[in-house]
Amino acid sequence: MNLPQRVKLVEVGPRDGLQNEKQPVPAAIKVELVHRLQAAGLTEIEVTSFVSPKWVPQMADNAEVMAGVQRQPGVRYSVLTPNMQGFDAAVKSAPDEIVVFGAASEAFSQKNINCSIAESIERFRPVVEAALAKGITVRGAISCAVGCPYEGEIAPERVALVAQLMHGIGVQHVGVADTIGVGTPLKVQRALDAALTVYTIDQISGHFHDTYGMALANTLASLQMGVWQFDTSVAGLGGCPYAKGATGNVASEDVVYLLHGMGIATGIDLDKLVDAGAFISDFLQRKPNSRAATAMLNKRQG
Ligand code: HMG
Ligand code: MG
């Protein structure tokens, strides 16, 4: 056991969460959500993505949302940029970090970003170069690192290969993503190990969707390897429009409850985080998809 003493959460609810909502979510609501998340102590927030509005209409208000956020010192704001067109648009919003998103599965790469893995790396190359030149940090996401909705199980070697390709073009950090939440702890550890053949423990994070209810177990398995950075989504919002049936990321509230219960610091105020989750869930007219949030909200009423 090699548990970290402190964990950094990247809150991806405003992006990974809201990209998948059927009903329109006004920019003002997204901005308010970001404000509530930073008030709860989140220091890394994935705000939006600069992708084609034809592909993902929910993120069409990207510039408006970025402009509406009142930035707080000590908080870093990231956005997704799949190509130079996205990067050129994003840069006007001055993100602290950009995310290029590739996949360990060829079929998913085609469905999600309309190109092969090799082509995606060539598209990312100038994006990474331009970002680094401007002092913007670059994270990479490796989708389908455990399983793919089109190809089934994915071998760890495929993760290592994409990690190598990303490292080769200067990507500074990779997120190992279980896009469709099919992973179980040993498989997830093998995927992380594959990324660790290229990146250090300080340069990788876990990004776990919770479709099969395994995301917390997978988070614990990652912690036991010393992984200390995770993407999580408030109220368990989310899913990828190109991964049918996949549900949201592991709920931020559940992960914070797990970590604090284990004596691992996050800097996050769980009560305020639950409030942020309740705010967006109220807007979406549903209950937070978080067991910890549900328990805490019930307790408050009781
Ligand atoms: P494409 O059609 O191959 O792009 O799409 P293109 O370069 O041929 O351009 C076609 C049209 O798209 C043109 O417009 C471009 O202007 C426009 P038209 O002339 O037809 O009017 N376009 C853009 N518009 C705005 N911003 C841009 C942009 N690029 C081109 N950046 C593309 C390629 C990548 C753009 C498209 O496939 C796309 O937008 N995909 C987005 C998919 C997406 O956002 N998926 C969800 C996020 S990833 C995720 O959730 C996984 C993650 O959470 C990790 C995990 O869980 O696995 C990160
Ligand atoms: Mg995701």
Image: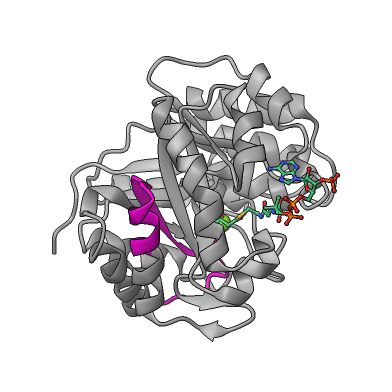
Asked if the stretch drawn in magenta spans residue 150, the answer is no
Judging depth in this view, the residue of 121 and 286 nearest the camera is 121
Residue shown at the point (35%, 78%) measured from the top left: 157
Residue 74 in the image, given as x and y percentages of width and height: 37, 20
Decide if residue 268 is on the left or right side of residue 56.
Answer: left
Q: Is residue 52 above or below residue 105?
A: above
In the image, 127 versus 221, the foreground residue is 127
Q: Position of residue 215 (x, y in %)?
A: 45, 65
Seen as rendered, the residue at the extreme bottom is 152
* Quarter of the picture holding the C terminus: top right
Colour scheme employed for the rendering of this structure: one colour
Residue 101 location (% of width, % of height): 53, 54
Residue 162 visible from this viewpoint: yes
Q: Is residue 182 above or below residue 132?
A: below
Q: Quadrant of the N terminus?
A: bottom left
Q: Which residues are magenta?
A: 163-184
Residue 210 in view (yes/no): no
Q: Number of labelled discs? A: 0
Q: Out of 205 and 262, give the one closest to the viewer.
A: 205
If the picture is divided into quarters, which one holds ligand 2?
bottom right
- Left or right for 218, reference 4: right
Look at 25% across and 51% down and name the residue there: 262
Residue that appears at 51% across and 41% down: 127
Q: Place residue 114 in its image quadrant.
A: bottom right
